[in-house]
Image (cartoon, rainbow, N blue to C red):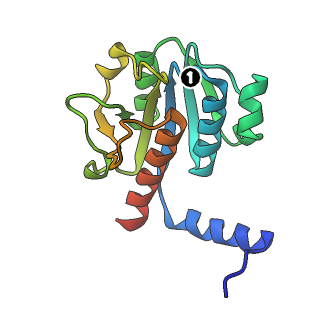
Amino acid sequence: MSRNLSPTELKRLHRDWRRRSDLRCSLILDGVQQPYNVGALIRSAAAYRAERIWAVDPTPDPGDPKVARTALGCDRFLEWERAASGPDAVVAARAAGFRVVGIELTDDAVPMYELDLGPSICLVVGHEDRGIKKDTLAVLDDVAFLPQLGKVGSLNVAQAGTVAFYEASRQRLTR
């Protein structure tokens, strides 16, 4: 019969999984506007060991009370940096050694699982309704989408970011 893990067992489990992966990841928030989405993305980024988040206006800061309520203090596990624009954030991510992949529904996007994401990936997500800005899309290394089987055409930006982090992590764990 299954039982819940104790706090010590849970720490051991996560430590063992961390040792199995050499994934380096980060995130660009290209105008994600809703504080609760930003907080959820911070939490997911921390859960997948992201190093840094680059934020492009109008993305709210981690200190915003609504962001903080959802992030639950996870911002302390990552670096946070403002970028003047999406392309500036992409340049900074590349300079830090990351391949930059947008998660967006475009005419040239490929299913994320078909991309070999490699050991150093920076994911880009955009505004909840308008997506990644055109000037940012123009400078990305790749654009990927998350195939969906239901009748809903897209996910909430925080959910999509979390699924994308999972796929990057899965690829490194199963290579």
Q: Residues within 10 Å of mark 1 (few under 14, many from 20)?
A: many
Amino acid bearing label 1: Ala
Q: Quadrant of residue 41?
A: top right
On screen, residue 131 above or below 120: above
Q: On the rendered structure, is 37 left or right of 128? A: right
Question: Judging from the image, what secondary structure is the residue with disc 1 in?
Answer: strand
Q: Position of residue 73 (x, y in %)?
A: 77, 40
Residue at 35% from the left image edge and 42% from the top image edge: 151
Residue at x 71% of width, y 27% of height: 62
Q: Which x, y percent locates residue 6?
A: 78, 74
Locate residue 103 relative to residue 159 in the image: left or right: left
Which residue is the extreme one toward the front? 151
Q: Quadrant of residue 170?
A: bottom left
Residue 97 visible in image:
no
Where's the N terminus, which quadrant? Answer: bottom right
Q: Quadrant of the C terminus?
A: bottom left
Q: Position of residue 128 (x, y in %)?
A: 49, 24
Residue 70, given in percent of the width and then of the height, sits at 72, 37
Q: Which residue is mark 1?
A: 55
Above/below status of 117 relative to 103: below
Q: Is residue 91 visible?
A: yes
| Outermost residue, bottom side | 1
Which of 2 and 76 lies nearest the eye of the viewer?
Answer: 2
**Relative to 28, 34 lies left or right:** right
Say which residue appears at 52% left-offset and 41% top-offset: 159
- Residue drawn where x is 31% and y is 38% of the image: 144
